[in-house]
Image (cartoon, rainbow, N blue to C red):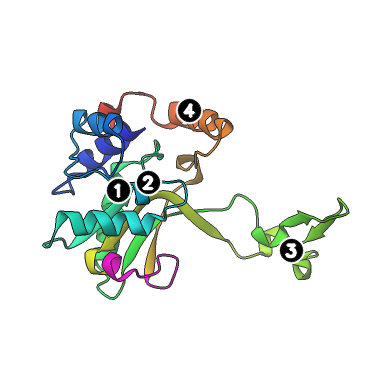
Amino acid sequence: MLAWTVAAARASSLFGRIVVSTDDEEVAQVAREYGAETPFMRPVELADDHTPTLAVVRHAIEALGDGLGYVCCLYATAPLLQPRYLREGFETLAARPDKSFAFSVTSYPFPVQRAVRINADGAIEAYYPQYRETRSQDLEDAFHDAGQFYWGRADAWRRGDAILSDRSLPVMLPRRLVQDIDTLEDWKIAERLFELELGDPHPEAAT
């Protein structure tokens, strides 16, 4: 998956440098084999399961030094990433100097206003009971972070501007190109989507 992300970044023709932040030499070697740089190793305190993305990006910016205008954070767990959306993200942000970020989003497949919880008694409760009688087609669309890329102005990353805010712009992705990977089931779904949408499993095929 890391190789695919690097290949997609290269295919976009947008980046002066493609840098992988890692604390693992094996990962660093894979990154270099596919054309990325590893000019530093990530410190241990920024390499656990609870480290926020913002801290990792800020560390990378500080390590790379001055002269950065735009910085894009790409997740290695995004095998459906496509260069055309990277280009759209950059163009979207560059056209709006009043904004800090542009990142990938997609729509929920079902109205979030109909979400339910299971209470302590094992029964169903509506999160938004005021919408129980509203037709689903009459409810407002909702979107979520697609977890693929985050374009940002270098100064915005340094300041720690909130990404999930009105300082950000959306880059809409179709749901068929979005799959978060946290479990084995997620992985299997991603494999099927990859085969349907992209066909060739080799990272060099990113276009």
Tell me, for residue 191, which label it has, or none. Answer: 4
2 and 4 marks in contact (CB < 8 Å): no
Does residue 158 belong to the magenta stretch?
A: yes
Of the two numbered discs 1 and 4 in the rendering, the one whose residue sits closer to the viewer = 1
Residue found farthest to the left: 67
- Indicate the secondary structure of the residue bearing disc 4: helix
- Indicate the secondary structure of the residue bearing disc 2: loop
Residue at position x 79%, y 64% in the image: 132
Residue type, mark 3 in image: Tyr
Residue type, mark 2 in image: Ala
- Residue 42 point in image, percent of width and height: 28, 46
2 and 1 marks in contact (CB < 8 Å): yes
Q: Main secondary structure of the magenta part?
A: loop
Cα distance in 3D space between marks 3 and 4 = 33 Å
Q: Nearer the viewer, residue 109 or 16?
A: 16
Task: Examine the rendered structure and indicate whether residue 34 appears above or below residue 165.
Answer: above
Is residue 144 visible in the rendered image? The answer is yes
Q: Quadrant of residue 169?
A: bottom left
Tell me, for residue 43, which label it has, or none. Answer: 1
Q: Which is more N-terminal, label 1 or label 3?
A: 1
Can you identify the residue that label 3 sits on? 127
The magenta segment is 156-167
Of the two numbered discs 3 and 1 in the rendering, the one whose residue sits closer to the viewer = 1
Report the number of numbered marks: 4
Q: Which is more N-terminal, label 4 or label 2?
A: 2
Tell me, for residue 73, which label it has, or none. Answer: none
- Residue 193 point in image, percent of width and height: 48, 32
Tell me, for residue 47, which label it has, or none. Answer: 2
- Residue 59 point in image, percent of width and height: 27, 56
User: Horizontal placement of 89 versus 15: left or right?
Assistant: right
Q: Which is more N-terminal, label 4 or label 3?
A: 3
Cα distance in 3D space between marks 1 and 4 = 32 Å
